[in-house]
Every structure is written in C-alpha cells, then in structure tokens.
Amino acid sequence: MSQADLSYEAEIDLSTLSRLERGILNVGFLTLYKVAKALKVPVRDLFDF
C-alpha cells in the first residue's frame, strides 16, 4: 500500500503520515488507531517490541 493510499484510507494528511513513518512526529492514539484500521491490523502491531 502506498503512503497516498494509506493516507486516504486512514483519513489523515499525507505529510503527517510521512513524518510518523520517519519517526519525527509523535501522534495520539486516535491517529494510530486510524492507521491500524486502514492496515487491518491491531494497534499493537504498529510497534516494534
């Protein structure tokens, strides 16, 4: 999935998604939830434990 597709599906700005992916932006749970929902994964899967 491209960043543009994910941004659209998660209903978040592409620049926000790009900064989040690069680790230069801290976001709230709602944004993480939207990304996880768009990717069809649990929120915990977005973290590297």
Image (cartoon, rainbow, N blue to C red):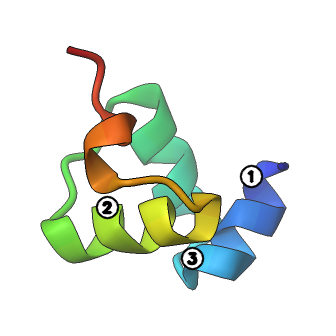
Q: Classify residue 10 by image quadrant.
A: bottom right
| Earlier residue among tags 2 and 1 | 1
Mark number displayed over residue 3: 1
* Among numbered discs 3 and 2, the one appearing first in the sequence: 3
Q: Where is residue 13, by image quadrant?
A: bottom right
| Distance Cα–Cα, label 1 vs label 3 | 10 Å
Real-space CA distance between mark 3 and mark 2, rounded to the nearest whole angstrom: 9 Å
Count of numbered marks: 3
How far across and down, in percent of the image, does residue 34 sit? 42, 74
Spatial CA distance of label 2 from label 1 is 15 Å
Residue 44 in percent (x, y) is at 25, 43
Q: Which residue is mark 2?
A: 32
Residue at image coords 31%, 61%: 32
Where is residue 11? Give x, y as percent.
Answer: 57, 85
Placement of 17 over or under 7, stated as above or below: above
- Is disc 1 placed on a helix, strand or loop? helix
At 58% from the left edge and 62% from the top edge, which residue is drawn? 40
| Discs 3, 2 touching: Cβ within 8 Å | no
Residue tagged 3:
10
Q: Nearer the viewer, mark 1 or mark 3?
A: 3
Quarter of the image where one finds residue 46 = top left
Q: Residues within 10 Å of mark 3 (few under 14, many from 20)?
A: many
Q: Choose between 16 and 43: the one closer to the eye.
A: 43
Q: Amino acid at mark 3?
A: Ala
Residue at 32% in and 69% down = 33
Amino acid type indicated by mark 1: Gln
Residue at 48% across / 63% down in the picture?
Answer: 35
**Could you say whether the residue bearing mark 3 is in a helix, strand or loop?**
helix
